[in-house]
Image (spheres, rainbow, N blue to C red):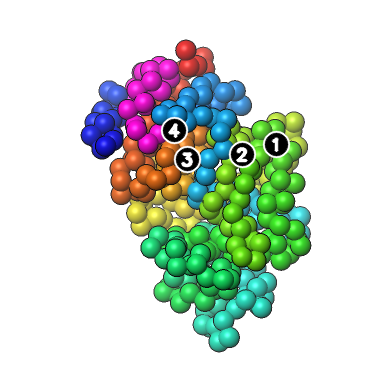
């Protein structure tokens, strides 16, 4: 039902004249044409410029951020390395999860590293997409993820798989002795506004690394602000190592669907002439950061909306281009209203 407004908006936003001088308030007014859109929050240099709810959405209501939670799992891995719980991204996975490996593992399993899991270069057959339902129907999600056949060598092409980030969640539990949700609340909780309302877990109680995490759009903004500010909380406390953020934002592979770069739980692309880092969840759950403009933007959508092929992702990128244009080059911060 929303296809024609979506296509019309994409066409308008693709025109050079449409991404130049529109005030932020007008940009957000016109975003109402995107039927799946539920919320938008725009912040610059730590100050919220605009909060909008669309079609019944609210920035204060928890929503499933889907795979945007992979960026949160990446942060926890970086903190675990900084705290000495993990050796680093080159640490091998097999010794950490030896009791969950297949009886006769593929020899390539010995080469699989934490970094490969973070960058979606594990080489294992993905558990996402059409395979997702079958994977989560298993009694042991960790064992099932490790039992997937290798379809590429570790370090090869990008194979997007929630199974990879779930293995990271299992590893975090193994080395810390603490549930991943508790780690997130302890390690990231000092950032004002950050809170996870709920997080699904597997039959063994391991929280689902990289999916089914509920938080408010405001909480997702607080997490994004932590990364925009080089890992420092609002009070100046260093929660995520700045070096880890730089590593996470360095592309190591590219999406076969969009061509965008992918680092450790973050996508990268150019939008409106600016380098943008973003987390992306199914249906259009987005966290954008534009470091050069000190800009952080959250967008959430109806999770029933399709993925890249539906056109909604492109429409959100186009909306982001207009938001950037409303702020880029302005001598004063352009506010909503």
Q: Position of residue 122 (x, y in %)?
A: 50, 68
As measured in the structure, the alpha-carbon distance from the residue carrying label 4 to the one carrying label 2 is 19 Å
- Up-down relation of residue 234 to residue 334 (above or below): below
Which of the two discs, 3 and 2, labels the residue nearer the N terminus? 2
Q: Is residue 307 above or below residue 62?
A: below
Q: Are marks 2 and 1 in contact (CB under 8 Å)?
A: yes
Q: Residue furthest top?
A: 337
User: For residue 80, which numbered disc appears in the image?
Assistant: none
Is there a contact, CB below 8 Å, between mark 4 and mark 2? no
Q: CA distance from mark 3 to mark 4?
A: 11 Å
- Position of residue 150 measured from the top left corner of the image (x, y, whole percent): 45, 76
Q: Nearer the viewer, mark 4 or mark 2?
A: 4
- Please tell me the numbered disc located at residue 38: 4
**Residue 151 found in image quarter:** bottom left
Answer few, some or many: residues within 10 Å of disc 4's Cα (few below 14, many 20 plus, some between 14 and 19): many
At 56% from the left and 60% from the top, the residue drawn is 165
Measuring from the top left, give residue 87's x and y in whole percent.
71, 64
Circle 3 SS class: strand
The reply to whether residue 220 is visible in this rendering is: no
Q: Residue at x 66, y 37 (%)?
A: 194
Pointer 2 local density, CA inside 10 Å: few below 14, some 14–19, many at least 20: many
Which labelled disc corresponds to residue 223?
2
User: How far, Cα to Cα, is label 1 from label 3?
Assistant: 20 Å
Q: Residue at 57% of width from left, 44% of height from top?
A: 214
Q: Which residue is mark 3?
A: 286
């Amino acid at each position: 039902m929303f296809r024609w407004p979506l296509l019309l908006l994409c066409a308008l936003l693709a025109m050079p004249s449409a991404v130049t001088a529109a005030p932020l308030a007008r940009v957000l007014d016109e975003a109402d044409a995107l039927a799946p859109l539920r919320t938008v929050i725009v912040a610059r240099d730590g100050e919220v410029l605009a909060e909008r709810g669309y079609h019944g959405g609210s920035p204060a209501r928890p929503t499933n951020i889907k795979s945007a939670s992979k960026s949160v799992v990446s942060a926890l891995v970086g903190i675990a390395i900084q705290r000495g719980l993990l050796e680093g991204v080159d640490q091998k996975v097999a010794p950490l999860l030896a009791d969950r490996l297949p009886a006769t593992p593929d020899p390539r399993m010995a080469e699989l590293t934490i970094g490969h899991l973070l960058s979606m270069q594990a080489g294992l057959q993905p558990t996402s997409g059409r395979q997702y339902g079958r994977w989560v129907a298993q009694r042991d999600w960790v064992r099932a993820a490790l039992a997937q056949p290798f379809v590429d060598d570790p370090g090869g092409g990008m194979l997007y798989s929630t199974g990879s980030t779930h293995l990271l969640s299992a590893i975090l539990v193994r080395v810390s002795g603490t549930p991943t949700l508790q780690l997130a609340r302890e390690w990231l909780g000092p950032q004002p506004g950050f809170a996870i309302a709920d997080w699904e877990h597997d039959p063994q109680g391991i929280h689902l690394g990289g999916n089914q995490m509920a938080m408010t759009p405001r909480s997702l903004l607080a997490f994004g602000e932590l990364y925009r500010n080089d890992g420092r909380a609002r009070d100046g406390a260093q929660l995520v190592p700045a070096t880890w953020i730089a590593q996470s934002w360095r592309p190591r592979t590219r999406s076969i669907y969009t061509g965008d770069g992918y680092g450790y739980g973050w996508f990268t692309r150019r939008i409106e002439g600016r380098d943008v880092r973003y987390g992306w969840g199914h249906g259009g759950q987005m966290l954008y950061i534009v470091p050069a403009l000190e800009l952080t933007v959250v967008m959430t959508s109806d999770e029933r909306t399709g993925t890249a092929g539906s056109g909604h992702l492109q429409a959100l990128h186009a909306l982001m281009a207009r938001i950037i244009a409303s702020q880029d080059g302005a001598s004063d911060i352009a506010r909503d209203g």
